[in-house]
Image: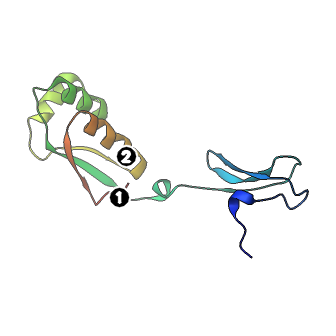
């Protein structure tokens, strides 16, 4: 017989069990007694050891928001970022999947088109 997770009961006292998901810990605990079962959950993106690189498809070296985004990501000042945007085939960041996801969001919010290599599935 298959047990529906929503109807899960404590094996010790029969009270309802509730789901736990805090940080990297997932499991169940009883709502009445001290019974619980937990394990470590590491998201797939954090297990991805691939080194990714982000390069710009198009960026406007006259757009202040885009210059500021590049400045923030590359850790350079405004003038250096503007000069960088005038070059072709710019790689602005290399890193792991969790870092790339954050940088991708910053660039997309600044309306900068990017390429990520190798293919980025997150």
Residue 32 image point, x, y percent: 87, 46
Secondary structure state at the residue bearing disc 2 = helix
Residue 54 image point, x, y percent: 25, 48
| Residue 46, numbered circle | none
Q: State the residue lying farthest toward the bottom.
A: 1
> Which residue does the image show at 9% across and 39% down from the upper left?
87
> Which residue does the image show at 20% across and 23% down from the upper left?
78
Viewed as shown, does residue 15 lie left or right of 102?
Answer: right
- In this orientation, which residue lies closer to the viewer: 63 or 6? 6
Viewed as shown, does residue 87 lie left or right of 103?
Answer: left
Q: Is residue 105 above or below residue 18?
A: above
- In this orientation, which residue lies closer to the viewer: 2 or 104? 2
Viewed as shown, does residue 119 lie left or right of 10?
Answer: left
Residue 114 image point, x, y percent: 21, 46
Secondary structure state at the residue bearing disc 1 = loop
> Which residue does the image show at 17% across and 23% down from the upper left?
64
Q: Is residue 113 above or below residue 79?
A: below
Residue 33 image point, x, y percent: 89, 48
- In this orientation, which residue lies closer to the viewer: 13 or 56? 13
Q: Residues within 10 Å of mark 1 (few under 14, many from 20)?
A: few
| Residue 121, numbered circle | 1
Instruction: Tell me how far mark 1 sits from mark 2, CA to CA.
Output: 10 Å
Q: Residues within 10 Å of mark 2 (few under 14, many from 20)?
A: some
The residue to which callout 2 is attached is: 101
């Amino acid at each position: 017989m298959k047990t529906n997770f929503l109807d899960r009961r404590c094996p010790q006292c029969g009270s309802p069990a509730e789901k736990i998901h805090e940080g990297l810990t997932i499991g169940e605990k009883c709502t009445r007694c001290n019974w619980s079962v937990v394990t470590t959950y590491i998201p797939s993106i954090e297990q991805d050891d691939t080194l990714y690189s982000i390069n710009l498809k198009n960026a406007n070296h006259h757009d202040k928001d885009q210059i500021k985004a590049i400045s923030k990501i590359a850790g350079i000042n405004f003038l250096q970022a503007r000069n960088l945007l005038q070059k072709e085939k710019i790689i602005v960041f290399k890193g792991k999947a969790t870092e790339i996801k954050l940088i991708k969001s910053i660039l997309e919010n600044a309306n900068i088109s990017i390429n990520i290599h190798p293919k980025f599935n997150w």
